[in-house]
Amino acid sequence: EVQLVESGGGLVQAGGSLRLSCAASGFTLDDYGIGWFRQGPGKEREGVSCISKSDGRIYYVDSVKGRFTISSDNAKDTVYLQMNSLKPEDTAVYYCAAANRRCRTGWFLYEYWGQGTQVTVSS
């Protein structure tokens, strides 16, 4: 059974840091692009970052470049999102998702999703 489980969310003050984890089971990370998405209150789902071992690519949305870092640990089947210098506008539910072979444009192209973890940044 394919499963993605996020953890690491919480409440943090602006300027603080959090590290989100996405633990995968039932498939091999090398065969999928793993993306982080977020959805804030009243907002559309937004792609934040993605990592793809098959083509060695990493992507970030412009609003998080220089602040967020995505990484993967194949030995632990886990993808991380290190979030530094957090801002109130980063407040959202964060989801990880898996797309076949590589990162994809469009959240609807991701096959498997975790349940989400809440990140709240206070001003």
Image: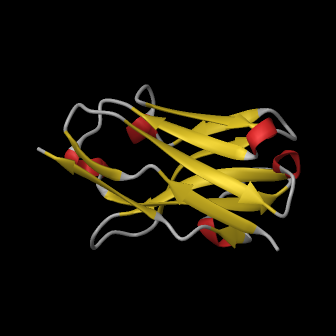
Quarter holding residue 6 = bottom right
Q: Residue at x 32, y 52 (%)?
A: 10
Residue 120 to residue 69: above or below: below
Q: Identify whether 49 is placed above or below 66.
A: below
* Residue 82 drawn at (x, y percent): 48, 35
Q: Locate residue 52 relative to residue 8 in the image: left or right.
A: right
Question: Is residue 57 left or right of 30 when viewed as pictured?
Answer: left
The structure residue drawn at horizontal position 69% and vertical position 45%, both measured from the top left corner, is 78
Quarter of the figure with the N terminus: bottom right
Q: Residue at x 45, y 49 (%)?
A: 8
The C terminus lies in quadrant: top left
Residue 81 % position (x, y):
53, 40
Front-lying residue, 77 or 83: 77
Residue 109 appears in view: no
Is 74 positioned to the left or the right of 120 in the image? right
Image spot of residue 18 (x, y percent)? 38, 39
Q: Is residue 29 visible?
A: yes
Q: Is residue 20 above or below residue 14?
A: below
